[in-house]
């Protein structure tokens, strides 16, 4: 088991990846609704968000499953906060 301090960058990276993912999802929905071609916005946004997030997970992991698990925990934390913010508005 790794020390908590050595896993902290993975947690922060996961949180930042989650913030980027859900922030760009919000942005895509806002622009896709008003667009003449919403399918292009939604499909393109999904492909870009997913590829950036998976690439980020890959580089954070570096072959260590514990870093991946902590990164995923940070991603889920960002999702929880994004959900709470969206219900508040």
Image (spheres, rainbow, N blue to C red):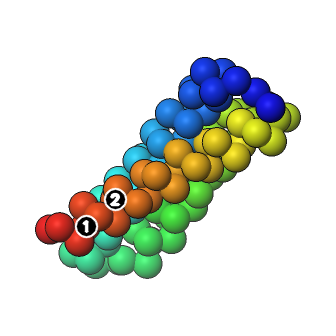
The residue drawn where x is 76% and y is 39% is 66
Looking at the figure, which quarter contains the N terminus?
A: top right
Residue 1, compared with residue 78, is above or below; it is above
- Circle 2 residue: 82
Near-viewer residue (82 or 52): 82
**Crowd band around label 1 with a 10 angstrom C-alpha radius: few (<14), some (14–19), many (20+):** few
Left or right: 15, with 82 as reference point = right
Q: Is residue 58 visible?
A: no
- Circle 1 residue: 86
**Crowd band around label 2 with a 10 angstrom C-alpha radius: few (<14), some (14–19), many (20+):** some
The residue drawn where x is 85% and y is 34% is 63
| x and y percentages locating residue 36 in the rendered image | 28, 78
Looking at the figure, which quarter contains the C terminus?
A: bottom left
Q: Are marks 2 and 1 in contact (CB under 8 Å)?
A: yes
| x and y percentages locating residue 74 in the rendered image | 53, 45
Near-viewer residue (25 or 76): 76
Residue 57, compared with residue 49, is above or below; it is above
The residue drawn where x is 66% and y is 21% is 6
Near-viewer residue (85 or 34): 85
Under tag 2, what secondary structure?
helix
Under tag 1, what secondary structure?
helix
């Amino acid at each position: 088991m790794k020390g908590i301090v050595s896993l902290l960058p993975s947690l922060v990276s996961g949180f930042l990846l989650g913030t980027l993912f859900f922030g760009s999802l919000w942005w895509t929905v806002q622009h896709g609704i008003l667009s003449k071609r919403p399918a292009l916005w939604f499909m393109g946004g999904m492909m870009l968000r997913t590829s950036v997030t998976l690439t980020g997970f890959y580089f954070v992991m570096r072959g260590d499953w514990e870093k991946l698990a902590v990164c995923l925990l940070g991603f889920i934390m960002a999702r929880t906060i994004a959900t709470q913010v969206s219900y508040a508005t």
